[in-house]
Image (cartoon, rainbow, N blue to C red):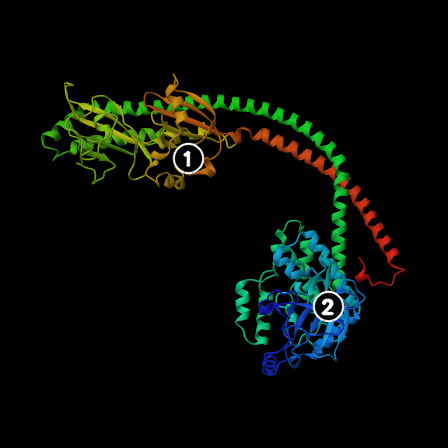
C-alpha cells in the first residue's frame, strides 16, 4: 500500500479506520476500479501519485487556470466510509482560510466516481522527505513544527481536533513550507465518538474505541512528529514492537497491546543526543508533549506554540548575553591569568623546597634503618656464635653422632634451654623473636628444631644456603657431593616461607670440634624480614601527616624482599598469587643506579613503588625515596614518602587561594549576570507588548500568524 506521495507503508503506519468485520464486508463487495486515465470534468489527469483503501490520488492540471492540483478519486465506492469522507471535506472547507492547511478547491459528489480536488504540493510528504534524506536539523524541525502548531491552533480555534497527526499528513511545497492535510479522522471538540490515530503517533488513551476526543491527543502527536524529524523514526518504534503488534489480529487486542507498550516502555531519549537540541529547551518540549499522563502534557497546541516561541526567543538572546559578558569576562580572565601565574610560581618554589627538605629527612631515616637492621642481624649472629662455641653443645653433638643420633636428649635439652634464655632476654627488651631455631649435622640432616616439627626432623636440608653458605639454593635432593657445611658465620640468601609466604632469612654458624679442625654441625635461626622492619616501622614511618613506608630490596636484582605493606593479608595474598613476591621488583633504572653508586645510597624525587601493581590504592602514585645499603648483606633499605603527603600543606594553601579566587570570580559573575538578567527581562517584556499591539487590529486567528 502507498500513501498520497507514493511511499510504501507497513500496515501499522496506517490509521485503523474499520473493524475487521467491516474490512471483511468491504472485501466481499464488488469493486468498480477506475480505468488507467479516468475523466474528471475541468481537470486533465497527468499521473497517479498515490493509492489508498478507497481510491487513488492523481496529479492533474486545472484546465481553467493551468495550475497543478491533486485529485482524490473514490473509485472503490461500495466499500467507502461516506461519513469519514464527508467529515474530511467539511473540515477542509471550514479550515480553508489557514495558509498552513491544504486548501480544498473543488468537490464532485455526484460524479462517478466521487472526487474532491486539493492544492498540489510538489515537495511530497514530510515522511517521504525524512525517509529519503534523513533527520532534519533542529532549526528546520522547529520551523516545520511551528507551522503545524499554527495549523492546529487555527483548527482548534474552530473546534476541530485533527486526531491523526503524523509525517504522512504533513505535505511540503516546493519551498519546503509545510501544510497539514487529511482530516478524515478529525472530530469536533464537543463530539464524544472515538477516533483512532496511527501507531506510535497517537497517545495511549486515544487507542481505545470508547475514548472521548481531547486536544491533548494532538499535543502528543506534535511531540511524536517533532521527535520523528529529529531522530528519523517515531518514538518507541522498534522492529520487535512492530512484530508484536503485527502478530495480533484483533483491532481491540492490538490497541490494548499498544497502550501497554506506550505506558510501560521507558520514555524515548534519542532526541536528547541530537546536535542542536538543548536539554532544557527543545528536548523538554518534546518530553512534555510525549508524557504518558495527559495531565502532564501541554493542554493544547497553543501552549506548545508558546513554548516554541519562548525557546526561540531565548536562543536569539544567547549571543546578546554572551556579548554582554565578554567585556567583563575578559577583564576578569586577565586578572586571574596574572594572579594564577604568580600563584603557580610561588607554589612551584615552595614545592621544590618541601621536596628537598623531605628527601633530606628520608636520607637520615634510611641511614638509621639500614644501620639498625645490620646491627640487629649482627647481634643475633653473635648470640649464635656464643652458643655454638659452648663445649656442652660440642660434647652433646659428638655423643649423638657416635650413637647415630639415636640418643639426642643432651642436644635437645641444651638447645631448648639456650633458645628459651635468648627469647626471655629479647622479650624483656621488647624485641622480636625468631621464627625458628634448628641444628643440622655435617650431612645436612636436621637433628633439632624449635618449635618442634616432626615433618622436618632428620630431613635433608643440605641443599639450603644456610647449610653450605654458597649464596645459592640447590634443588631439594640434588645437592652436589662436593658441597660441605659452611665454615664461617653466614646470612643466607632470602627465601620465601612455604607456610607464611613471607620472605625469610637464616643466620647460621658452624659448630666446630674441640681442636677446631672439623665442623660437626650447623646451628641456625630464621626470622621474617618483616619482623626486622616492624621493630623500626613506627619510629621511621613517623606521624600520620608524614606517612613513610619502609622496605628491603635485593640490590643485586631489584627484587622486593619485604615491605611494610606485606603486613596486610590482602596485599600478601596478591603478592603471592603469581608465585611468591619474586615478581615484585624496582625498575631497571633504579637498580642500575644502586649498583653504580659508590656508597650504595641514592635518593629519588619520583619513585614508583613496585607494590602499585597489586595494591594501586595504597601504593600507587609518585613517592620520594631514599636508599641505603644494609652492611655486607647485599640488601638495601628503602624509606619512601608519598609526594602528595609532602606537598599537602602547599596544596591546601593553593586550594584555599583558588577557593578565594573562585569566590571573587563568582561574585563578579553574579553581579554581571544580575545586570543582564534585568536587561533581558525588560527586552523580553518589551517584545511581548509590541507583539500584542500589532495583533489587536487584525482578525487573523493567532494560530495562523507567523
Say whether residue 370 is visible.
Answer: yes
Residue 401 at what x, y percent from top left? Answer: 12, 30
Residue 120 at what x, y percent from top left? Answer: 72, 64
Which mark is first along the chain, 2 or 1?
A: 2
Q: Which residue is mark 1?
A: 611
Q: Residues within 10 Å of mark 2 (few under 14, many from 20)?
A: many
Residue 349 at what x, y percent from top left? Answer: 59, 22
- Which picture quadrant has residue 30? bottom right
Question: Which residue is more in the foreground, 497 or 606?
Answer: 606
Q: Quadrant of the N terminus?
A: bottom right
Question: Which residue is more in the foreground, 486 or 678?
Answer: 678
Is 450 on the left-hand or right-hand side of 376? left
Question: Which residue is more in the foreground, 260 or 646?
Answer: 260
Question: Gap in Å between the C-alphas at discs 1 and 2?
Answer: 68 Å
Query: Is residue 638 placed above or below 215 in the rendered structure?
Result: above
- Which picture quadrant has residue 184? bottom right
Residue 478 at what x, y percent from top left? Answer: 18, 33
Q: How many marks?
A: 2
User: Going by the picture, which residue comes out furthest to the left?
Assistant: 402
Q: Residues within 10 Å of mark 1 (few under 14, many from 20)?
A: many
Look at the numbered disc 1 and give the secondary structure of its residue: helix
User: Going by the picture, which residue comes out furthest to the right?
Assistant: 697
Disc ID at residue 215: 2
* Rendered residue at 21%/28% (across/down): 467
Mark 1, mark 2: which one is toward the viewer?
2
Question: Which residue is more in the foreground, 462 or 665?
Answer: 665
Look at the numbered disc 2 and give the secondary structure of its residue: helix
User: Going by the picture, which residue comes out furthest to the top?
Assistant: 598
* Rendered residue at 62%/30% (across/down): 653
* Rendered residue at 54%/73% (across/down): 248
Disc ID at residue 328: none
- Which picture quadrant has residue 145? bottom right
Amino acid at each position: 500500500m502507498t500513501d498520497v506521495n507514493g511511499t510504501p507503508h507497513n500496515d501499522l503506519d496506517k490509521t485503523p479506520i474499520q473493524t475487521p468485520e467491516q474490512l471483511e464486508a468491504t472485501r466481499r463487495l464488488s469493486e468498480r476500479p477506475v480505468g488507467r486515465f479516468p475523466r474528471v470534468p475541468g481537470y486533465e489527469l497527468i499521473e497517479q501519485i498515490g493509492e489508498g483503501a478507497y481510491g487513488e490520488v492523481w496529479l492533474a492540471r486545472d484546465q481553467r487556470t493551468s495550475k497543478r492540483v491533486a485529485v482524490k478519486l473514490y473509485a472503490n465506492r461500495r466499500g467507502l466510509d461516506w461519513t469519514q469522507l464527508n467529515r474530511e471535506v467539511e473540515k477542509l472547507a471550514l479550515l480553508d482560510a489557514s495558509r498552513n492547511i491544504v486548501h480544498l478547491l473543488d468537490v464532485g459528489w455526484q460524479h462517478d466516481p466521487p472526487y474532491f480536488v486539493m492544492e498540489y504540493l510538489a515537495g511530497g510528504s514530510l515522511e517521504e522527505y525524512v525517509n529519503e534524506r534523513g533527520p532534519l536539523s533542529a532549526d528546520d524541525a522547529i520551523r516545520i513544527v511551528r507551522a503545524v502548531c499554527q495549523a492546529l491552533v487555527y483548527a482548534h480555534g474552530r473546534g476541530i481536533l485533527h486526531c491523526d497527526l503524523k509525517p504522512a499528513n504533513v505535505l511540503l511545497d516546493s519551498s519546503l513550507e509545510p501544510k497539514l492535510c487529511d482530516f478524515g479522522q478529525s472530530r469536533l471538540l464537543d463530539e464524544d465518538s472515538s477516533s483512532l490515530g496511527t501507531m506510535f503517533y497517537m497517545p495511549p488513551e486515544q487507542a481505545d474505541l470508547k475514548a472521548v476526543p481531547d486536544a491533548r491527543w494532538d499535543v502528543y502527536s506534535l511531540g511524536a512528529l517533532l521527535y520523528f524529524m529529529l531522530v528519523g523514526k517515531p518514538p518507541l518504534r522498534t522492529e520487535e514492537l512492530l512484530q508484536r503488534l503485527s502478530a495480533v489480529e484483533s483491532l481491540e487486542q492490538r490497541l490494548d497491546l499498544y497502550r501497554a507498550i506506550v505506558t510501560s516502555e521507558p520514555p524515548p531519549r534519542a532526541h536528547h543526543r541530537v546536535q542542536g537540541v538543548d536539554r532544557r529547551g527543545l528536548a523538554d518540549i518534546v518530553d512534555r508533549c510525549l508524557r504518558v499522563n495527559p495531565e502532564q502534557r501541554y493542554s493544547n497546541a497553543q501552549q506548545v506554540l508558546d513554548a516554541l516561541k519562548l525557546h526561540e526567543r531565548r536562543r536569539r538572546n544567547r549571543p546578546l548575553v554572551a556579548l554582554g559578558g565578554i567585556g567583563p569576562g575578559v577583564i576578569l580572565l586577565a586578572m586571574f591569568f596574572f594572579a594564577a601565574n604568580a600563584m603557580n610560581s610561588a607554589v612551584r618554589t615552595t614545592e621544590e623546597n618541601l621536596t628537598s627538605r623531605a628527601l633530606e629527612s628520608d636520607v637520615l631515616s634510611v641511614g638509621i634503618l639500614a644501620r639498625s637492621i645490620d646491627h640487629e642481624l649482627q647481634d643475633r649472629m653473635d648470640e649464635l656464635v656464643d652458643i655454638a662455641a659452648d663445649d656442652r653443645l660440642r660434647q652433646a653433638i659428638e655423643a649423638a653422632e657416635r650413637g647415630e643420633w639415636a640418643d639426642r636428649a643432651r642436644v635437645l635439652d641444651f638447645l631448648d634451654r639456650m633458645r628459651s634464655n635468648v627469647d626471655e632476654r629479647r622479650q624483656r627488651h621488647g624485641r622480636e623473636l625468631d621464627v625458628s631455631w634448628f641444628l643440622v649435622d655435617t650431612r645436612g640432616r636436621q637433628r633439632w628444631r624449635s618449635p618442634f616439627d616432626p615433618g622436618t626432623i632428620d630431613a635433608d636440608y643440605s641443599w639450603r644456603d644456610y647449610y653450605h653458605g654458597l649464596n645459592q639454593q640447590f634443588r631439594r635432593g640434588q645437592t652436589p657431593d662436593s658441597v660441605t657445611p659452611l665454615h664461617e658465620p653466614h646470612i643466607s640468601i632470602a627465601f620465601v616461607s612455604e607456610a607464611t609466604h613471607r620472605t625469610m632469612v637464616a643466620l647460621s654458624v658452624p659448630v666446630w670440634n674441640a681442636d677446631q679442625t672439623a665442623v660437626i654441625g650447623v646451628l641456625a635461626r630464621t626470622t621474617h624480614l618483616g619482623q626486622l622492619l616492624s621493630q623500626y616501622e613506627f619510629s621511621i614511618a613517623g606521624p600520620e601527616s608524614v606517612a613513610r613506608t619502609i622496605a628491603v630490596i635485593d640490590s643485586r636484582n631489584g627484587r622486593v624482599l619485604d615491605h611494610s605493606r606485606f603486613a596486610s593479608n590482602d596485599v600478601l595474598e596478591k603478592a603471592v598469587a603469581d608465585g611468591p613476591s619474586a615478581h615484585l621488583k624496582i625498575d631497571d633504572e633504579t637498580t642500575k643506579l644502586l649498583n653504580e653508586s659508590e656508597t650504595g645510597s641514592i635518593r629519588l624525587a619520583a619513585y614508583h613503588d613496585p607494590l602499585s601493581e597489586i595494591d594501586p590504592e595504597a601504593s600507587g602514585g609518585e613517592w620520594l625515596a631514599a636508599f641505603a645499603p644494609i652492611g655486607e648483606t647485599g640488601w638495601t633499605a628503602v624509606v619512601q614518602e608519598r609526594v602528595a603527603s609532602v606537598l599537602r600543606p602547599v596544596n591546601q594553601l593553593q586550594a584555599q587561594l583558588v577557593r578565594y579566587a573562585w569566590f571573587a570570580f563568582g561574585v563578579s559573575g553574579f553581579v554581571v549576570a544580575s545586570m543582564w538578567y534585568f536587561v533581558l527581562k525588560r527586552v523580553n517584556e518589551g517584545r511581548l507588548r509590541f507583539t500584542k499591539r500589532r495583533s489587536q487590529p487584525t482578525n487573523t486567528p493567532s494560530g495562523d500568524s507567523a
